[in-house]
Image (cartoon, helix red, strand yellow):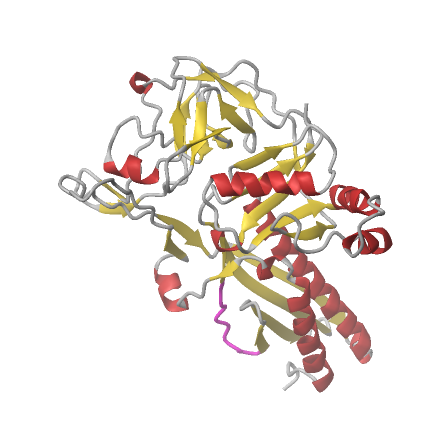
Amino acid sequence: MPNDFSKQEIVAFEEAGLGFDDALVMSKTIKKYDTDQTTMERTGDVIWRPMKIVMQSHDGSDATGDFDDVTELSVPATIGYDKHASWPMSSTEMRDASKEGKIQTAAKQTLASQINVAALAVAGTGSLTVKRTVAATGFDDIALCDSLMNENGVPMDYRYIALSSRNYNAMAGNLASRATVSGKVQTAYERALVGEGIAGFDVLKLDYAGRLAAAGGVALTIGTRVADAMYYTPKAVSVATTGEKSNVDNRYQRVTWSDTTGAAAGDRFTITGVNSVHPITKVDTGQLKTFRVVSVDDGTHVTITPPIISAQGGTDAELQYQNCVVNTAAANSLIVFLNTVAADLNPFWYRDSIEILPGRLAIEPNGVAVRRMTTESGLELVMQKQYDIMTRKTYIRIDTIFGLVNLNTEMNGVMLFSQT
């Protein structure tokens, strides 16, 4: 039939698919979760993924009164990314098989790039923030990310950080200047390569990076007293007045500020007197808890991540998932923005805190040639080809669908350089 793939086209598609895996840098650093496609279709492409359970501990041999209720939290994951590259070829252009192969390679590159960009964007939605008042220097920078993750109970393996080209090269330059050290110094000088194993992180170099504008909010405050009720109580489900139960996404909280003028989604901040606690021991780390603005809802309300779980309400769920402590409660605790200067976003993350969910397209080959392949990373590529007799053009497209979810915004975040 006229829409069949030629042998050259099949070979080109398979070669592009192999190269696709090589280009998927980010998908190799995050967890893959395979879904049942029938179930996903029936649930609107949404599945609830469980978060890590944190348990309380008690002292002594007498457990009377210590049998606390356990709340298991989950977050929604959606197959919501639908990417494709498509192009027409005339009957004269089709005479050159190499041209089609080059276009397929370019299509692979742009799709892989879009997947990497999407994954990096998700990694950048975490709440952990390392603010540096200097330009990138090297070990000391990444060591601060390591310390922040340790204090927040993030597992110590499978940690990654992705640096913008300028920040990455600045670190490489710092390494190269250390003439008394071999190994990494030589590769840093010759190839501008930082490489693996810096303060427990694998380091990636970005040829594209997101940017975060300087925060515009000034003298904004939040109430942190018990009476202000700005503390959050985690819950697995909510119950409607009809009795119907539905899952709750506990990654976010809507809070009241004195004002939201100048605030914007993406802003990162601390709250005066609110320190982080280790999620297991619940011990005050002595460091201010970092938060991120998810959305500015109106003149006095913002949605933030993570929620302020300070255990001020004293419930089992709060004690189980406590992430901060209010050392100095006040009606007007100051919001201190960390992004004081516009800068590149350098995301860092723990592998299992972010998931990619491969999807599948069901396409009937009615007058269209269809060829599929599944990459090593689990993503499916679908190539379709159709000839139009009216225009003597052949239309070709390559599709892939997938989902990404940040399972725990307290296990990933960004580093900002050259802040004031």
Asked whether 175 falls inside the magenta stretch, the response is no
The N terminus - image quarter: bottom right
> Residue 148: x, y in percent?
54, 38
How far from the left and from the top, in percent, is residue 99? 81, 73
Q: Quadrant of residue 190?
A: bottom right
- Magenta segment boundaries in residue numbering: 358-369
Q: Is residue 170 left or right of residue 304?
A: right
The C terminus: image quadrant:
top right
Residue 233, given in percent of the width and then of the height, sits at 30, 34
Q: Nearer the viewer, residue 5 or 16?
A: 16
Residue found at the far left of this picture: 64
Q: Main secondary structure of the magenta part?
A: loop
Q: Is residue 250 above or below residue 6?
A: above
- From this view, report whether residue 362 is shown above or below residue 191: below
Residue beneath the point at 74% across and 51% down: 194
Q: Is residue 316 visible?
A: yes
Q: Where in the figure is residue 130, as x and y percent of width and height? A: 60, 35
Q: On screen, 399 above or below 2?
A: above
- In the image, 34: left or right of 176? left
